[in-house]
Amino acid sequence: MGTYTTLPDDIQKVDVIVAGGGTAGCVVASRLAEADPKLSILIIEQGINNYNVPEVVHPALFPRNLLDDSKTALFWKGNKAPQLADREPIVPSGGTLGGGSSINWMVYTRAQRSDFESWNTPGWSANELWPFLKKFETYHGKGEREHHGYDGPINISSGTFRAKRAENDFIEAAAKIGYHELKDLQNLDANDGVERWLRYVGPDGRRQDAAHRYLHPKLQSGDYPNLHVLVESQVVRVLFDDNKRAVGVEYQPNPKSQAGNVSVRTVGASKMVVVSSGAIGTPLTLERSGVGDPTILKRAGVPVVEALPGVGNDYQDHHLTLYAYRTSLTPRETINGFTDGRFNVQESIKKNDELLGWNSMDASGKFRPTEADVSALGPEFKEAWERDFKNASDRPLMIIAMYLSFFGDHATLPDDAEYVSMANWTAYPYSRGHIHITGPDLSSPIDFDVGYLGDKHGLDVKKHIWAYKTQREIFRRMSIFRGELASSHPRFPAGSKAAIVEKVEGPVLDDDAKRIEYTVEDDKAIEQHVRETVQTTWHSLGTCKMAPREKLGVVDANLSVYGVKGLKVADLSVPPENVGANTNNTALMIGEKAADIFIRELGLLGKERL
Ligand SMILES: Cc1cc2nc3c(=O)[nH]c(=O)nc-3n(C[C@H](O)[C@H](O)[C@H](O)COP(=O)(O)OP(=O)(O)OC[C@H]3O[C@@H](n4cnc5c(N)ncnc54)[C@H](O)[C@@H]3O)c2cc1C
């Protein structure tokens, strides 16, 4: 039992290896250990141990995880993208024990019912997944009781702080343009309204990441001597025997944290290998193992074990834009002070400042356009809307969220006010990308096309144009509104009625029916700005789909990789279609569902500690 940076000599072979100790990986390993404490399990995680790392456990410090010198994030470089103003987008993902759940922004949202139905996979319908969605949570909110769980490891609460003034302001302003407050926007069916959102933060103000909530208590309890965690070690490839059975993995100490110690080693698995390295890491590990499109494997110099052309295809994310606003908020109504140095972090930790237990996101919504809005977006958009959204009333077009924090270089901000952000992201992008290896080793560059805004008819960018206008209508109606930060908004042509207002006493829109007017030229300015700034929402998904093999599926309904034995995938690589929500909830659910499948297959039912 324990957490190691070098595996003890006596651990040469275990029953189950989990390759990647992220959100889903921690859930799978923990539930297997609970099911049979005698089962030997080894998690191999490339990042550091997250135990009590300040920027992990204190919610308000979350922006620190994405700084250039982060020890908790991985940064994946995308190919140059002409549709993104020739940028090479960077997509960060969780890079420590706990994965994304250790560094994410802790926003609690759930997928919609029709999302799970669209997966069209036996055992994975919304009704069949309900028990797993409830299993991991202990809900402290005011939502609809029957839709939530009350004895899972992950607390869902307000944490220790809410900025009520801004929260109420947002809710009231959204209602003025037709988006009303809903009691529970996370019941799988509710949509097209706003909510006072909760977070993956406990009532004690601590982040509820999968490692702290599932794994560490077990590792510390002494009750699970066969649960092992190897950190700072990268899985290079899965090893197969002559019958294509996964029998172990090849791994190496991570050169970033264990320089000088890098040599490739192997460890065996007698029952199962579960790849859980995230929607970016997992397809790369499969390809390095010889499972993937033969053309890509050949190009990379990797012998083919199983030809599965779906690996690494159809990469999806939710595309995010951020707009900054000047406000009348006080320093203790935002978390900016933790990021720009005005608050003393050590002192705040020492005195257990209630602000530390806050992720700065108190009110947001799932939004659909009106029929008039749809028509204004053009005939191709209307056709897509009528096909994909009109009759699926639980499907939002965009998620619009208010963060009481500024995400950018704080040194560039005027020091005359608190600046905050509105975040817009696409619930179901049409654009797709891909992620592949170009060589056999971890050090080989990757071929990563993020695909953002790449859809043939330019529908995804239109969603952003609509969302830009919608969030602006809301923010200008808020009483905390004091202006727009010009550098984070489109460059409207001179004389535009939609011009940026940099400093003003808000609210500036008091007529509920009146809207800001935009010309065709204004729309072009918004489009250009979106292309120049759109970025990852860190919701990578769908690169090893759970789908029939002939439809480029990689795993079946039991998460078994086609064509080989003893190899499973359990993470956000497997959803065949996107979800209209932040993705941590779906990753936790996949962890729970995967564990349930594996426990049955391994014959562990009834073996749990009594
Ligand atoms: C900055 C950020 C903000 C986010 N905000 C939110 C939010 O507010 N709300 C929300 O619901 N979701 C959010 N998400 C998304 C959510 O956290 C992820 O979707 C979720 O964590 C994915 O879970 P996973 O198990 O699929 O992969 P991950 O949690 O990414 O786990 C994969 C793990 O595998 C490890 N790994 C990768 N390659 C290897 C290798 N070769 N060998 C060994 N280990 C490897 C990684 O280090 C990582 O720990 C955010 C994500 C990020 C990064």
Image (cartoon, grey):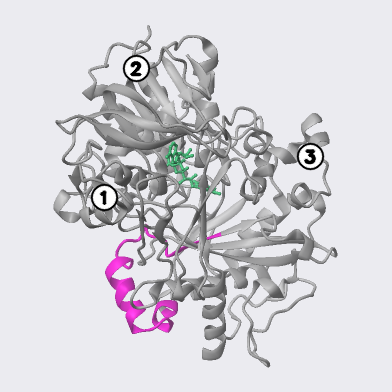
- On screen, residue 399 above or below 541: below
| Mark 3 secondary-structure assignment | helix
Question: Residue at the spot x=27%, y=70% of the render?
Answer: 387
- On screen, residue 181 above or below 355: below
- Point out the tag, 2 or 3, that comes first from the N-terminus: 2
The residue labelled by disc 3 is 345
- Asked if the residue under mark 3 is in contact with the one under mark 1, i.e. CB atoms within 8 Å, the reply is no
The residue labelled by disc 1 is 119
- Point out the tag, 1 or 3, that comes first from the N-terminus: 1
Question: Residue at the spot x=36%, y=72% of the render?
Answer: 455
| Mark 2 secondary-structure assignment | helix
- Point out the tag, 2 or 1, that comes first from the N-terminus: 2
Residue 138 position within the rendered picture, expressed as x and y whole percent measured from the top left: 50, 30
Q: Which quadrant would the C terminus be assigned to in this image? A: top left
- On screen, residue 373 above or below 535: below
Over which residues does the magenta segment extend? 372-400
Residue 556 position within the rendered picture, expressed as x and y whole percent measured from the top left: 20, 41
The residue labelled by disc 2 is 35
